[in-house]
Image (cartoon, helix red, strand yellow):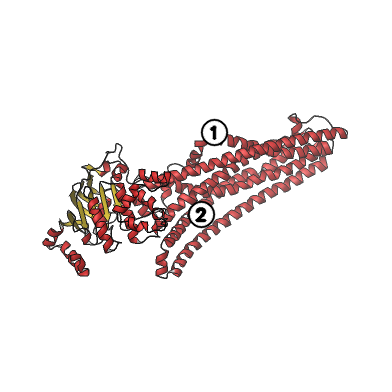
Amino acid sequence: MADDHGGFEHIRDTVDGHPMVNLITYALRYWPRLLVGVTTAVITRFARLVPALIVAATIDRVVLGGADPGLLTDVGLLPTGAIVGEAARLELLRRLVVIAAVAYLIRSVTRFASRYLLQSTAQKVQRDLRNDAYDHLQRLSMDFFVNHQTGAMLSVLNSDINRLEQFLNSEFRQLIRVVATVSGITIILWSYSPKLAAIALLPVPLIGLASAGFLTWIEPRYQSIRETVSRLNSRLENNIAGVDIIKSFDRYEFEHERVATQSEQYHDEQIRALRLRRGFFAALRLMTGIAFVAILFVGGRDIILLGDAGGLSTGSFALFFLYLRRLYSPMRRIGRSANKYQQAKSSAERVFGLLGHAPMIDDPDDPHDPAFIRGDIDFEDVTFGYGDREPVLSDVSLSIEHGETIGLAGETGAGKSTLTRLVPRFYDVDSGSVRVDDVDVREYARQSLRRGIAIVGQSPYLFSGTVAENIAYGDLETLTALRTDGSVPDAVVEAADAAEADRFIQDLPDGYRTEIGERGVKLSGGQRQRLAIARAILNDPAIIILDEATSDVDTETEQHIQASLSRLIADRTALVIAHRLSTIQDADRIVVMDDGEIIEQGSHDDLLATNGAYADLWRVQVDENPATAD
């Protein structure tokens, strides 16, 4: 089903399993790195708790000279008994300094190891996800690209996958921080004073419950925000690509209003989510503040009224306040992590929804994979329509022998281009069949079929890069050779010469190494067309599809190209769609289509003699341009 505005509103319906579990599965590919990273991260958190213990021991035993054992004494790092005399105190202080130095050294080493290992794992997951998503996107059927906008796809491949990397990079470490810090502090505080520990830990389950509720409240808002971003990206991408149209029609204000409307919608949704976030975080701070005040009052009162009999020393009381910040800081961070989790989950739904979107057209279980394609084509009672729309083709039957050149004529919308798109199986027929070399195209391995077919469209797409790279794209071996040593292969020059392109290429600033810009914007329409023809020539296909391939060239250039094409398609099957009938008048056979049906076929002379639809089209063009009558 097509998404509204060409976005990805419904793509999450195709997620296989829970999106965040799928994300973790990607990370578990690197489990040895993860295991070491998690272990060193836990050690780092435990090492961060040692300085507070040292401060408590310094107050109680070095400054006050008490005999209070404390945790460091319990584990054998400090001697038992009262510390008497300056020498004994200085010796104890030196021991505490050594313990602190070792703790900081361990913390530094393990912090480096954990951050490097966990962050590099996040980068690897990002790389794998983007590679897999892009590869899967390429293999989706043409209907997917028709129903989804380019900006929305780029949003998934870039911002959504980047968001997942950021989540793994920061929030996974925060989860380790929370678990290790809360566990360590709970054990330590409980060993000093169960009563004060209970007060300190009371907000912990409340924060957990509040965070769970926050996830439920914020989830639909982040889903809406991601879709709004996708639509905004699509609008911006469309406007930037169509800047020449905007300028020529002076539609600055109109497009500004459309962008401003979607920007305002994004702004409003972000503000609503921001209001929810800020309120939630304020509530968390209030809970932790109440616990701080309660400990201050209860602990202080016990020291004043009970003294040593209360079981809480001065250093231990200070220890509670030193740990409170370390305890509540990661707990409050749970709220932010919950916020980041929902953002990441929304992005993960889109990424794994894309990965779970099955192509409408796929290879059969045991595909036909021939060594070469001869070029026979048979359309047998073909009926086809795009989606739920009316059929574009109705019961079309046509047999083409290999090496035959077929011209396709007819008014715009007659179904000519659609008919040719069924040959490389960009779409599947609704009924009937399309056969190549007497094998249904649905039985082929798609890439084996398409390697034998070259297409030159009315508006050929060129990649940002050099002239040579765009021509070499027609043959993988030539392209690889070009990228390996940088020199222009002879095959590229020969293909360009055959397409009447070598002459203008030589006049370019850097010849075959000239950068042509995005979509070939630095070239004229005719130049782009000739490069596309050269690319198809280099492909050396058994079947050539020319869809208005000479529509953007002048008459002289067209004559040169037609002469070259006549030589090149002599032993190949060619389907030539032409608005200018002069382009196909020498075809072996001309097929005339109207409203999705074949109404005439024959040679140019035979069709003129029949005095039917083709003859009418020919006369119209002769009247418009008497030169075509020659």
Amino acid residing under circle 2: Arg
What residue is rendered at 19% in x and 67% in y?
622
Amino acid residing under circle 1: Pro
Distance from disc 2 to disc 1, alpha carbons, whole Å, reads 37 Å
Image vertical order of residue 243 relative to residue 305, above or below: below
What residue is rendered at 32% in x and 56% in y?
530
> Where is residue 257 drawn, in percent x and y?
46, 67
Nearer to us in this view, 232 or 497: 497
* Residue for badge 1: 32
Locate residue 6 relative to residue 623 in the image: left or right. Answer: right
Circle 2/circle 1 CB separation < 8 Å: no
The answer to whether any part of residue 20 appears in the image is no
Q: Nearer the viewer's eye, disc 2 or disc 1?
A: 1
Chain-order first, disc 2 or disc 1: 1
Q: How many marks?
A: 2
Would you call the spot at circle 1 few (<14 residues within 10 Å), some (14-19), or many (20 or more)? few
Classify residue 436 by image quadrant.
Answer: top left
Q: Residue 221, which numbered label? A: 2
> Where is residue 196 drawn, in percent x and y?
72, 41
Locate residue 381 relative to residue 140 in the image: left or right. Answer: left
* Label 2 secondary element: helix
* Label 1 secondary element: helix
